[in-house]
Amino acid sequence: MLKRVFVAPDPGRARLRFAVRAVLGITAAVVLCGVAGLPLAAAVTGGLAALLALFTVTDATVRGQAVTTALLPCVGLPVLAAAAELHDHPVARDLTFLAVIGAGVYARRWGPRGHSLGVFAFMTFFVAQFLHATTDQLPELYAAVVLSLLTAATVRFGLWCYERRLPPAPVPAPPAGTGLARVTTRQAIQATAGAGFALVVGQLLSGQRWYWAVGATWWIFVNTTSRGETLVRGFRRVLGTVIGIGLGLLLAVPLDGAALPTAALLALCVFGIFYTAAVSYTWMMLCVTLLAELLYGLLGVLDPALLALRFAETGVGALGAVLAVLFVLPITTHTVTDAWIQRALRCVHACTAEAAARLAGDAHADPAPRVAELEHLLGRVRLSVAPLVHPLNPMLRRKRRARRVLALLDDCAREIRGLTAVAADPAASHDARLTTACRRVETAVEALTGGSGHGRRDDPVPPTARDATDLAARTPAAPAHPQGPGRTHPHGSASAHPHDAAPVPSHGPALDQPQGPTVAQPHGPALAHLHGLEHALAELASPLRAPSGSPLVGA
């Protein structure tokens, strides 16, 4: 676990910049709340608002992020008012809390913005329970939220907006469907049911800290879809909480709210939350747990008994989430995995079509955005397959199949990146064999995805790329200039096709031997990458269609 966090790749130091900016923004927000004369409870509320604004807003463009940040108080302030107004009406408060949870999860159907607003609404209600907020505190809480959001926005979009130098992050459309066939609808019902269980049992454990159980259920449902993902996330949340409680006994309890060391540890926890979130949910939960303990120390209520209660309430919340995903409109791991793998395979085809069109001379064809989308889709595949490859998964055969699929999809991505680099070379010339190989890739993808055509809603292949590829197919072939000796296909075969071959068989692509003089040309590497892609797709047929157990795709 240590290696995963501290040795994990951080391209462009994105995670580091993300974490450092968060520390600056949240610290500035809390300091300004103090300078404005707001009490400690308001400063805590403001710090949380700044944290959420910097953590949960993930729109693809900077402009979209700014719009979402501006909308946060539109949902947060009314929810805060409702929570304070209902403080002395427990039944109405509880029902309203469950309604906020259901609406917050359902809002994910509108993508990153809906997700951010849903999380902010939930956490606003949650912090009102954390601080036992009442209506007479609303003016100072409102001031803290608005001031902190303005501060966080100034840091994010003014002082340190490193996203402006980055291409927009691809955001795949959420899975289609209507009614109960829509994943977000089923998840909203599951989360509400699980939170209802956590609320009732949590109140039996403690009439004061029951919201911890509800919070555990909510956060277990964040960034998960299938029951397998939810079970793994629940396990990691409990594990991170246990480790965090242990650290709290060693650090937070002895400090007893001492201002300066507590502030330093709070900053370190904020850094840890942001730095580890992308690579380890367990580590992130460790930091969240320690941060909450330090805040309770500042409020003067921290003791070992409270930490034991925290562990019990977290267990109740995790149990509520587990029961909900198992028995309330369950979404199987294989259903979700199949959908993401098929989308990744269709994106492979789209990347190939764009690269072929670029090599055919279409100046408007650009495979680079498709490659970025493919990387994002593969990330979703890894997330959905995580329960199958988890060390505690007892189904060893499925675990091996899942690992094989991930390895072959990584091979596809590597070949696509290489093909894109070749297509970006201005000196690259078109060879009709590239079109032939691209058509074999298309045939292989359609075979793996059940023959899905271009008319699908989530098929990313643009008409211009297909038109350019079709035009290339009618273009006379360039003189054959295969690769020289020693430059062979990475799987051991030569990397040129002098004729149109049949669709890729299940045992692997047919790789023809090159003929002609030894002259290096750009289409040689392109063909090598295409043949590597064919090989990976052919190898995928076996694990994706294995008859034993649940199929990973389509069978």
Image: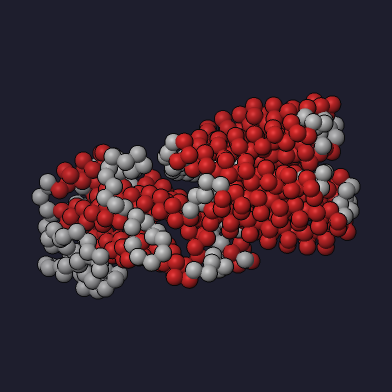
Seen from the viewer's position, the closer of residues 70 and 14 is: 70
Q: x, y (%) of residue 182?
A: 47, 40
Residue 410 picture quarter: bottom left
Task: Residue lying at the far front in this picture: please name it.
Answer: 327
Residue in the picture at 36% in, 61% down: 544
On the rendered structure, is 49 left or right of 10? right
Q: Is residue 548 visible?
A: yes
Q: Is residue 186 above or below residue 92?
A: below
On the rendered structure, is 218 left or right of 506? right
On the rendered structure, is 293 left or right of 494? right
Seen from the viewer's position, the closer of residues 226 and 371 is: 226
Residue in the picture at 74% in, 31% down: 92
Seen from the viewer's position, the closer of residues 317 and 264 is: 317
Coloration of the structure image? secondary structure
Q: Is residue 165 visible?
A: no
Q: x, y (%) of residue 62?
A: 53, 36
Q: Quadrant of the N terminus?
A: bottom right
Residue in the picture at 15% in, 48% down: 473
Q: x, y (%) of residue 78?
A: 69, 26
Q: Is residue 37 above or below residue 426?
A: above
Residue in the picture at 48% in, 39% down: 180
Number of numbered discs on residues: 0
Q: x, y (%) of residue 227?
A: 54, 53
On the rendered structure, is 531 left or right of 294? left
Q: Quadrant of the C terminus?
A: bottom left
